[in-house]
Image (tube, grey):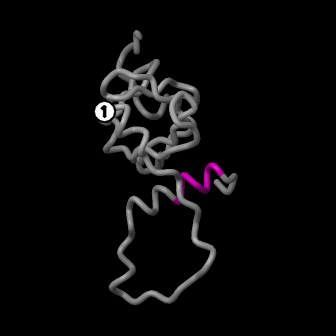
Amino acid sequence: MDLGNPASYLVLAEGTPVLSSDGEEIGTVEHVLAATDADVFDGLIVDLRAGPGGHRFADAEQVESIYERGVVLRLDAQAADRLPEPAENPATVEWTGPEETVPDEMGDKLRRAWDYLSGKY
């Protein structure tokens, strides 16, 4: 598969093929998660219909490279099958102390992915 030239996450389109590190097409890009005002790429929501099905979250650190016509993950096909599903925002509010206010970076990313999929974002 000719992936074309290297590209930025800013021009990555929905439906772009996503490949594992071992060259298997595992799905397509559903959505790019980024804070564009700060130029920060958080990761991708990948539609794995080519594999086990459903939406999964690939963190930016799990993305090896982005091209015009494809994305290559740092994970082989078997590891990509185990990517997490986007997480729903919790429905309850609990008191937290100062020691618990450090952001959970991966949890925050998964919740943003869920917000996108559920239409809140």
Residue 38, compared with residue 90, is above or below; it is: above
Residue 107, compared with residue 75, is above or below; it is: below
Classify the position of the N terminus by image quarter.
top left
* Residue drawn at point x = 54 percent, y = 52 percent: 113
Residue 22, compared with residue 35, is above or below; it is: above
The magenta stretch is: 111-117
Is residue 42 something that shows in the picture? yes
Neighbourhood count class around disc 1 (C-alpha, 10 Å): few under 14, some 14–19, many 20 upward: some
SS class, disc 1: strand
* Residue drawn at point x = 58 percent, y = 66 percent: 89
Q: Is residue 113 magenta?
A: yes
Is residue 39 something that shows in the picture? no
Q: Is residue 62 magenta?
A: no
Residue 70 position within the rendered picture, expressed as x and y whole percent measured from the top left:
44, 22
Residue 84 position within the rendered picture, expressed as x and y whole percent measured from the top left:
45, 51
Specify the principal SS of the magenta part. Answer: helix
* Residue drawn at point x = 52 percent, y = 25 percent: 16
Nearest to the observer: residue 39 or residue 63:
63
Residue 95 position within the rendered picture, expressed as x and y whole percent measured from the top left:
50, 89
- Check disc 1 and give the amino acid type: Glu
Classify the position of the C terminus by image quarter.
bottom right
Nearest to the observer: residue 8 or residue 60:
60
Label total for image: 1
Instruction: Report the side of 23 relative to 86 (left or right).
Output: left
* Residue drawn at point x = 35 percent, y = 37 percent: 63
Residue 3 position within the rendered picture, expressed as x and y whole percent measured from the top left:
40, 15
Residue with the most extreme right position = 119
Nearest to the observer: residue 90 or residue 105:
90
Residue tagged 1: 64
